[in-house]
């Protein structure tokens, strides 16, 4: 298993100012970091080189919004979404990112007032297939993320995202599992983890209140049992949120700080993940 920390806890973009924090995470025992990929004008090649020098591998996360929604009825809006995710993949390749994860299948925080239509599903699959073809060309994998019903209406369960990526049907396109969204939407954690099968490319470890994993109400025993029993042996990345990025805080409804400080959350969360995995692999 590989252990990572999502840097969104600190910032919406990773520049040289974040490197001391990355050093702290390496010292704490992390194998890698997850880079927010919202600003596409940063020097990602240089960033990747700096993280290589620390021995930190990379994954990345991005989103789409209403103005670049890949399931919009407006073809030009869908095309913009596809193009921006392709550009994000280019940044990932420059930074040495292994997998780009997130809800870039549709607009975060936008609602139609109903569930997805047949047309939206078709547009989504078509948009993601174009993105997957580019991902394959630049050597980056896709980890499509389902979100709970309060954050999107397109993919709400891990069964949804499993069906979606199988319809996209491209070797570069897989899905991710997230303990926070599962805690809201899934009746069976085990079924949710197993839904991905060979398409499960990534896992987010996130507490029910988005703070320190292991200190809340997520069904951790069932989650770790399912993860280990599934044979998954990839990234476990902590996703916790603070107030660093107003747009994300608004979408995730984070209004207060729920932890002592960021590095303590990261350290305690890492120890929790390793302890839970090790006792199941002993």
Image (spheres, rainbow, N blue to C red):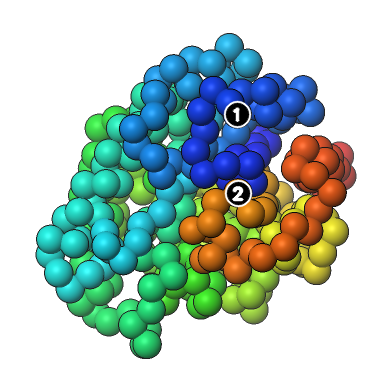
Q: Quadrant of the N terminus?
A: top right
Q: Position of residue 244 (x, y in %)?
A: 60, 49
For residue 150, which numbered disc appears in the image? none
Q: Which mark is residue 18?
A: 1
Residue at image position (67%, 53%) is 242
In the rendered image, is residue 136 in sight?
A: no
Question: Residue 263, can we see it?
Answer: yes
Q: CA distance from mark 1 to mark 2?
A: 13 Å
Please tell me whether residue 68 is drawn above or below residue 109 in the rendered image.
Answer: above
Residue in the image at 67% along x and 23% along y: 20
Mark 2 lies on residue? 244
Q: Residue furthest top?
A: 53
Under tag 2, what secondary structure?
loop
Q: Name which residue lies at 80% across and 44% down.
A: 261
* Front position in the image: 128 or 49: 49
Residue 88 % position (x, y) = 33, 40
- Residue 68 placement, left or right of 2: left
Left or right of 134? Residue 100 is right
Residue extending furthest toward the bottom: 113
Q: Secondary structure at mark 1?
A: helix
Residue placed at 25% from the left, 74% from the top?
A: 120
Q: Is residue 156 above or below residue 16?
A: below
Position of the C terminus, as image quadrant, is top right
Q: Nearer the viewer, residue 219 or 21?
A: 21
Q: Within 10 angstroms of label 1, few (less than 14), some, or many (20 or more) residues?
A: some
Residue 92, by quadrant, is top left
Residue 133 figure quarter: top left
Q: Are the residues at dot 1 and dot 2 in contact (C-beta closer than 8 Å)?
A: no
- Residue 254: percent from left, percent from top: 64, 64
Counting residues from the start of the chain, the first of labels 1 and 2 encountered is 1
């Amino acid at each position: 298993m590989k252990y990572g920390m999502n840097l969104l806890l600190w910032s919406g973009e990773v520049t040289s100012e974040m490197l001391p924090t990355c050093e702290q995470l390496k010292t704490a025992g992390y194998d890698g970091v997850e880079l927010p990929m919202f600003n596409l004008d940063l020097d990602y090649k240089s960033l990747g080189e700096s993280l290589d020098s620390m021995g930190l591998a990379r994954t990345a996360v991005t989103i789409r919004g209403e103005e670049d929604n890949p399931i919009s009825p407006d073809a030009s809006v869908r095309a913009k979404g596809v193009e921006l995710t392709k550009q994000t993949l280019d940044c990932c390749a420059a930074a040495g990112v292994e997998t780009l994860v997130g809800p870039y299948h549709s607009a975060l925080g936008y609602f139609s007032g109903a569930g997805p239509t047949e047309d939206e599903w078709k547009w989504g699959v078509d948009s993601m297939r174009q993105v997957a073809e580019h991902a394959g060309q630049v050597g980056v994998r896709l980890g499509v993320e389902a979100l709970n019903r309060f954050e999107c209406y397109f993919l709400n369960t891990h069964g949804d995202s499993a069906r979606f990526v199988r319809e996209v049907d491209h070797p570069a396109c897989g899905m991710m599992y997230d303990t926070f969204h599962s805690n809201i939407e899934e009746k069976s954690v085990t079924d949710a983890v197993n839904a991905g099968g060979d398409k499960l490319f990534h896992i987010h470890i996130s507490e029910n209140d988005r703070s320190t994993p292991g200190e809340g109400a997520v069904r951790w025993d069932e989650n770790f049992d399912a993860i280990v029993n599934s044979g998954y042996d990839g990234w476990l990345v902590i996703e916790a949120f603070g107030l660093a990025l107003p747009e994300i805080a608004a979408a995730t409804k984070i209004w207060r700080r729920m932890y002592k400080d960021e590095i303590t959350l990261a350290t305690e969360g890492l120890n929790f993940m390793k302890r839970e995995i090790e006792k199941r692999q002993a």
